[in-house]
């Protein structure tokens, strides 16, 4: 069962099937940034695609979780990192250091996979991106276990775009993620700055 939630998601999130609002049992923050000379927020995992593919991710209390974000494949010329130096308001959810760098690439797909999650828990993934261009062609789509999620930007400069999706009881503890330029908008570039994974009791 997969449910889409668009917009900002707070720490208290209503999960379908739980009968109400609950707090996450743990939170894993992922900062998509290369490993050279860039600031990383406290309690965030720095993740540089292939270089960090087997990293044991820490939760927001800096405790090892046993969860890995695996770099699987890419189609195209390869994803790169671009630093905008943007000091943006992440609404408290995404600190500015996690939004200063983003992964970007034109006409290229990137595939990642969370492994070692619990098949009896519920997970909400929230993605964010921001960049300095005003280009209506730069929109990003994320596909999670076959469910499409549109980041309806970034097509306006210095605006933080967020989108969330919830996965209930992922089969074998796996969540597959595909990031690409938006097909709906015939986009030229896809961009992704950071991601938050929240775990809830199902």
Image: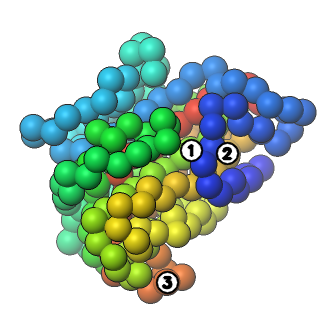
Q: Position of residue 131 (x, y in %)?
A: 31, 62
Q: Earlier in the sequence, mark 2 or mark 1?
A: 1
Q: Taking the image as drawn, is residue 110 in sight?
A: no
Q: Taking the image as drawn, is residue 76 in sight?
A: yes
The correct choice, above or below, for 140 with respect to 87 in the image is below
Q: Earlier in the sequence, mark 2 or mark 3?
A: 2
Q: Position of residue 67 (x, y in %)?
A: 46, 28
What element does badge 1 sit on? strand
What colour-coding does the image apply?
A: rainbow
- Say which of 47 and 160 sits in front: 160
Residue position for label 3: 185
Q: Position of residue 110 (x, y in %)?
A: 36, 61
Instruction: Tell me: 98 left or right of 39.
Output: right
Residue position for label 2: 167
At 10% from the left edge and 40% from the top edge, which residue is drawn?
36
Q: Nearer the viewer, mark 2 or mark 1?
A: 1
Q: Residues within 10 Å of mark 1 (few under 14, many from 20)?
A: many
- Say which of 1 and 84 sits in front: 84
What element does badge 3 sit on? loop
Query: Gap in Å between the C-alphas at discs 3 and 1?
Result: 23 Å
Q: Residue furthest left?
A: 37
Numbered badge on residue 125: 1
Q: Position of residue 135 (x, y in %)?
A: 35, 79
Query: Gap in Å between the C-alphas at discs 2 and 1?
Result: 8 Å
Q: Earlier in the sequence, mark 3 or mark 1?
A: 1
């Amino acid at each position: 069962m997969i449910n889409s939630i668009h917009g900002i998601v707070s720490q208290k999130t209503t999960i379908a099937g739980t009968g109400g609002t609950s707090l996450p049992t743990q939170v894993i923050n992922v900062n998509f940034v290369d490993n050279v000379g860039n600031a990383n927020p406290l309690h965030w995992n720095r993740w540089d695609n292939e270089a960090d593919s087997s990293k044991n991710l820490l939760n927001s209390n800096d405790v090892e979780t046993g969860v890995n974000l695996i770099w699987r494949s890419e189609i195209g010329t390869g994803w790169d990192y671009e630093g905008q130096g943007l000091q943006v308001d992440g609404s408290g959810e995404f600190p500015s250091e996690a939004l200063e760098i983003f992964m970007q690439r034109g006409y290229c797909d990137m595939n990642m996979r969370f492994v070692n999650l619990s098949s009896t828990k519920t997970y909400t993934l929230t993605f964010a991106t921001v960049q300095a261009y005003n280009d209506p062609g730069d929109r990003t789509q994320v596909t999670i276990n076959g469910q499409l999620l549109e980041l309806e930007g970034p097509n306006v400069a210095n605006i933080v775009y967020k989108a969330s999706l919830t996965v209930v009881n992922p089969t074998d503890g796996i969540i597959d993620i595909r990031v690409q330029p938006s097909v709906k908008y015939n986009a030229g570039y896809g961009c992704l700055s950071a991601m938050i994974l929240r775990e809830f009791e199902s």
